[in-house]
Image (cartoon, helix red, strand yellow):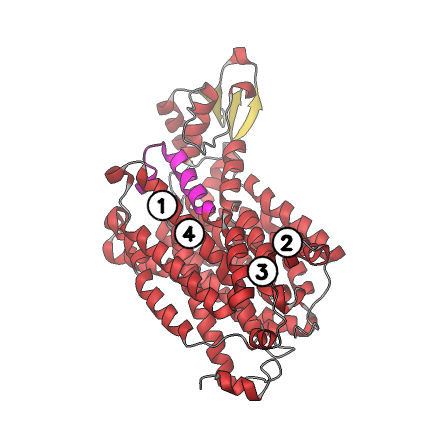
Amino acid sequence: MRVSESAYAVAPPALRELTPREVRRVIFASSLGTVFEWYDFYLYGSLAAIISKQFFSAVNPTAAFIFALLAFAAGFAVRPFGALVFGRLGDLVGRKHTFLITIVIMGISTTLVGILPSYARIGFAAPVVLILLRLLQGLALGGEYGGAATYIAEHAPHGKRGAYTSWIQTTATIGLLLSLLVILGCRIVLGTEAFEAWGWRIPFLLSAALLAVSVWIRLTLNESPLFQEMKREGKMSKAPLTESFAQWGNARVVLLALFGLTAGQAVVWYTGQFYTLFFLTQTLKVDAQLANILIAISLVLGTPFFLVFGALSDRIGRKPIIMTGLALAALTYFPIFRAITHYANPALEAAQSASPVVVVTDPAGCSVQFNPVGTAKFTSPCDIAKAALVKRGVPYSNEVASAASGTEVRVGSTIVGHNDSAALTTALDAAEYPVKADPSGMNKPMVVLLLWILVLYVTLVYAPIAAMLVELFPTRIRYTSMSLPYHIGNGWFGGFLPTTAFAIVAATGNIYSGLWYPVVISLATLIVGLLFVKETKDVDIR
């Protein structure tokens, strides 16, 4: 049954509890549209390796992949600006109309990626247009989440906001899962060669159909009852940005929400659901199709726990659940990722243990294997040696030598010159360093279990966050105030995680060193959250 605005005129919307059917309709319509938006957004991340070849083929493969990651991160970088633009609009004109606009922008931008010519056809214009489309996606997503979370929370009865909004929290994972399943299906039907040549465009083009469905569903919704009541009583904010960020009382809460909640939540989310995919495919050299299957299984097994912890937060509080997730992540990331290596590519672990690789060189002659602008040339002896090892996916350590000694690579007891690629390949083969992970040697159930644990951490930190952010801010500026810390946390701290971690690993040679980024951010957020963030579950948002 449709909730009519005339009905609200009889029973005040802030006091009227929706029927179960109305509740299901509000949650389904809001969540389904958000699933599609996340699907659109994460297609790019899942296809980063292919996109690097299609749009950044003018540079070497390592730089191309980093370019692709940076273009992915560009969408995250502008999310806070989308939060400002659409958050203000949502507090001025309403929640429903705003997230209708965001979904249209997202759907059109994603569809256009599917028809965008590659670098081989239109040259430099291809990556430029791609990045512009990524920026539009980021702007749209910056306005989407706050609107959907606020809309559902403002329909929820007191004591059930965690349970209701946890459905929104599943949408990011479901959107990622949907993107992986569509990609996997296209790979199986078309074959790897055809998929990488042109079939990768199909998942993007499907966004046109998803857009039509999402817009139709959201057009059937009414405005948030709390917003209608506020508008009727003339209590709306005339300057949401000023009230949210220029007045210290609210600005302080915004800062606490960022540094005591969303920054840590973001790095746990992206480590558990994105960095794992990069780690499997780029570091451990697991076949992309198999890696997608393993990730998809862990997501299916883990997603119900968003609802479990969302409902639990209504009983014991949001803060204890989020802080527990942050603490577990910081304490266990290193052993879990070492275990993933052990079970996913035991040959790599065995080779590293039996014949460790050491680059012996003068550090002054080395460059960081990170080229974000595509202009650096890695031509020094140190750079040549490290580039060869990075390309092969071989972990290495560094040992200082004098400039006069030159650069050499030790593979166990074998010493190879920096520029002797044939000898290096022979030495690595002799030491049994695998070129790719062997599926027959993989303990797949254990890999799935470890991936599931990482997803479980995601559900702990993410399930209660929407309800908590809604409860931190007043209705008149809620959309604006909650959107900015959420999207700075997830757009900047989380969105730059893959690029940052990849650069750290490439610089050090240690395949686990990139984990220091999420560990440090999680610990910092845990400390701020424990000391300064108050529990919100009993707050009356009316």
Q: Position of residue 462 (x, y in %)?
A: 58, 62
Q: CA distance from mark 1 to mark 4?
A: 10 Å
Q: Nearer the viewer, mark 1 or mark 4?
A: 4
Q: Secondary structure at mark 2?
A: helix
Q: Position of residue 501 (x, y in %)?
A: 53, 41
**Marked residue nearer the N-terminal end (3 or 1):** 1
- Position of 246 relative to 471 (above/below): above
Label annotation for residue 130: 1
Instruction: State if disc 1 and disc 3 touch (CB < 8 Å).
Output: no
Q: CA distance from mark 2 to mark 3?
A: 14 Å
Amino acid type at image mark 4: Leu
Q: Position of residue 44 (x, y in %)?
A: 39, 51
Q: CA distance from mark 3 to mark 1?
A: 28 Å
Q: Secondary structure at mark 1?
A: helix
Amino acid type at image mark 1: Leu
Q: Secondary structure at mark 3?
A: helix
Q: Nearer the viewer, mark 2 or mark 4?
A: 4
Assess whether residue 184 is covered by the magenta stretch.
no
Disc 3 crowd rating (10 Å Cα; few below 14, some 14-19, many 20+) is many
Q: Nearer the viewer, mark 2 or mark 3?
A: 3
**Marked residue nearer the N-terminal end (2 or 4):** 4
Label annotation for residue 480: 3
Q: CA distance from mark 4 to mark 3?
A: 19 Å
- Position of 177 relative to 291 (above/below): below
Residue beneath label 4, please? 136
Residue beneath label 2, please? 258
**Marked residue nearer the N-terminal end (2 or 1):** 1
**Marked residue nearer the N-terminal end (1 or 4):** 1
- Residue at point 38% right, 49% down? 133
